């Protein structure tokens, strides 16, 4: 039943079982299509970051490259991340307003334009500008894709799926590291062409993902909130039919008690979203900021400049194999630890991955002067085997602990703030540390960067221990009540059951 409203931004009040119907589905091939169509975009991000880190020598060449310095390499990483921050905020707001599907198609197109243009860079200035555009597309993807994935994947699989998908970044990193070996070999590919072909590979993979992504539907959760409940019901019915056909099983009926009542709205203002995040969920806001700042500094500082560190201090020529081993460890870590986020729980796993990786990185900093290229890589593999799942859990947390209507913008906000603090300053600081330390031929000069990253990870782990949210195997609507469900409660004269930061239950089966 639908009721009309005099508010032009409101559409009416409905009761729906769409979330419960999606959450009770068994895993099927349809869910793999979502993983491939949406999740594989992180392969592109990993490819981009690794290529830049592994092209240091080629880009520094004044004859065949662009004449960049180590500081310029750090600056290139910083502007890429800055573009990602801007893109996340811009496209995150648009994702919540216009839908997940429209924006995850647009953001992928922006990425494709940026990375193709990078391959044709003729000056440092053009290269930096292209990196900003490429980053903007990737930043927008983080908001649009993570929100869509979590709204389409059943609750009991959400944690492991989200962690594994974000961990797929390292498949791209490994591929990027390995593919640069032949492309940067002047005996196989002309020196001035090889590094440009590396960027062209990202565009090729992006086109494949764009083709698969056409089959991914709009989020039914977004549809019923914004007045398109008939489209949402149709999509869910189609998904149910596909799952029945693929699994051969009948689906359990959804009890009326699992229905949710919402007052639909065309748009929700930024003021309302800000009040929700900072006033109703202050503990979760602090949690997400701590997680994002820690992982952003750790990864962007260490990984953006790791290839440069190996070449500058440890006499490594081709860094591809080292970076590939490092990346494989990250991916395997995410895959191995991901199921534990659903089984053991969010709070113990998030706090443990942050604390352990922080301590290990501090030890690496202490031993830095005695490490070789091999032993430093082994240390990095151990640190980031654990840190990979922790970093992915930051995106999972921001996606699931805030209301549906704010989900994409919250992901974008915490990604942008955390990355601006950790991801922009990290590469800049490390780039300068490398320049300064190389002048004295002393690798221990960059240890301070390790210590800062370690401290931020430990702080994130402690915050998670005290402020973490036990969201494992719970419906998104039970983890954070939709704003429109609260509107419906107010309309009925009922208030929320509990305080927001204590984990409210959505308004279930209160039919208008």
Image (cartoon, grey):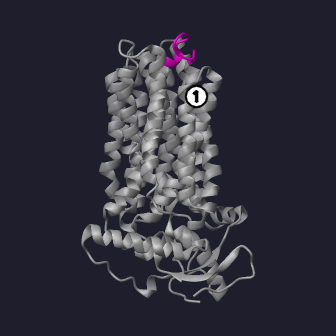
Residue 213: x and y in percent read: 45, 53
Q: Circle 1 — which element?
A: helix
| Residue at the disc numbered 1 | 76
Task: Give the position of the C terminus as an image quadrant.
Answer: bottom right
In-front residue for pair 146/394: 146
Q: In percent of the image, x 40 and y 71: which residue is there?
A: 238
Q: In percent of the image, x 42 and y 42: which residue is there?
A: 43
Against 454, is 431 above or below?
A: above
Q: Quadrant of residue 81?
A: top right
Query: Is the stretch drawn in magenta largely helix, strand or loop?
Result: loop
Magenta segment includes 225: no
Magenta segment includes 61: yes
- 422 relative position to 391: left or right: right
Q: Magenta stretch?
A: 58-69
| Label 1 CA crowd tier, 10 Å (few <14, some 14–19, many 20+) | many
Residue 110: x and y in percent read: 58, 42
Against 242, is 354 above or below?
A: above
Residue 302: x and y in percent read: 47, 32
- 285 relative position to 28: left or right: right
- 121 relative position to 258: left or right: right
Q: Quadrant of residue 245?
A: bottom left
Q: In percent of the image, x 41 and y 55: which residue is there?
A: 162
Q: Quadrant of residue 487?
A: bottom right
In-front residue for pair 284/240: 240
Task: Give the position of the N terminus as an image quadrant.
Answer: bottom right
In-front residue for pair 452/438: 438
Residue 507: x and y in percent read: 54, 81
Q: Can residue 432 be seen in this snapshot? A: no
Q: Can residue 383 be seen in this snapshot? A: yes
Q: In percent of the image, x 62 and y 20: which residue is there?
A: 123
- 209 relative position to 407: left or right: left
């Amino acid at each position: 039943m639908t009721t009309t409203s005099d508010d032009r931004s409101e559409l009416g009040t409905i009761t729906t079982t769409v979330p419960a119907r999606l959450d009770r589905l068994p895993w099927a091939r349809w869910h793999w299509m979502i993983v491939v169509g949406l999740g594989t975009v992180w392969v592109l991000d990993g490819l981009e970051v690794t290529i830049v880190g592994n092209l240091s020598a080629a880009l520094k060449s004044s004859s065949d490259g662009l004449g960049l310095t180590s500081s310029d390499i750090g600056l290139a990483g910083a502007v890429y991340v800055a573009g990602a921050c801007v893109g996340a905020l811009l496209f995150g707001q648009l994702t919540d307003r216009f839908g997940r599907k429209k924006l995850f198609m647009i953001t992928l197109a922006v990425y494709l334009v940026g990375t193709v243009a990078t391959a044709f860079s003729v000056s440092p200035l053009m290269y930096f500008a292209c990196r900003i555009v490429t980053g903007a597309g990737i930043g927008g993807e983080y908001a649009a894709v993570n929100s869509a994935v979590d709204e389409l994947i059943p609750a009991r699989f959400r944690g492991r799926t989200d962690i594994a998908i974000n961990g797929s970044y390292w498949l791209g990193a490994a591929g990027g590291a390995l593919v640069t070996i032949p492309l940067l070999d002047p005996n196989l590919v002309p020196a001035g062409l090889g590094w440009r072909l590396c960027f062209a590979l990202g565009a090729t993979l992006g086109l494949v993902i764009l083709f698969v992504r056409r089959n991914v539907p709009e989020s039914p959760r977004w549809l019923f909130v914004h007045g398109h409940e008939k489209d949402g019901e149709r999509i869910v019915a189609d998904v149910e039919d596909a799952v029945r056909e693929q699994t051969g099983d009948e689906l359990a009926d959804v009890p009326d008690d699992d229905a949710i009542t919402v007052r639909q709205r065309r748009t929700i203002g930024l003021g309302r979203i800000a009040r929700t995040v900072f006033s109703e969920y202050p503990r979760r806001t602090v949690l997400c900021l701590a997680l994002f700042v820690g992982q952003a500094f750790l990864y962007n500082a260490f990984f953006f400049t790791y290839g440069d560190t190996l070449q500058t201090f440890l006499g490594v020529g081709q860094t591809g194999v080292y970076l590939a081993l490092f990346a494989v460890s990250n991916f395997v870590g995410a895959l191995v630890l991901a199921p534990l986020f659903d089984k053991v729980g969010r709070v113990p796993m998030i706090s443990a991955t942050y604390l352990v990786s922080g301590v290990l990185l501090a030890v690496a900093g202490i031993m830095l002067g005695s490490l070789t290229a091999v032993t430093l890589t082994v240390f990095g593999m151990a640190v980031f085997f654990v840190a990979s799942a922790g970093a992915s859990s930051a995106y999972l947390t921001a996606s699931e602990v805030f209301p549906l209507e704010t989900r994409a913008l919250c992901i974008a906000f915490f990604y942008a703030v955390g990355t601006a603090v950790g991801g922009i300053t990290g590469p800049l600081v490390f780039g300068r540390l490398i320049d300064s330390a190389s002048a004295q031929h002393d690798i221990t000069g960059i240890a301070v960067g390790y210590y800062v990253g370690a401290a931020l990870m430990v702080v994130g782990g402690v915050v998670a221990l005290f402020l973490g949210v036990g969201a494992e195997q719970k419906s998104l609507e039970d983890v954070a009540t939709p704003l429109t469900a609260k509107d419906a409660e107010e309309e009925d004269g009922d208030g929320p059951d509990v305080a927001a930061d204590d984990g409210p239950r959505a308004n279930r089966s209160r039919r208008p």
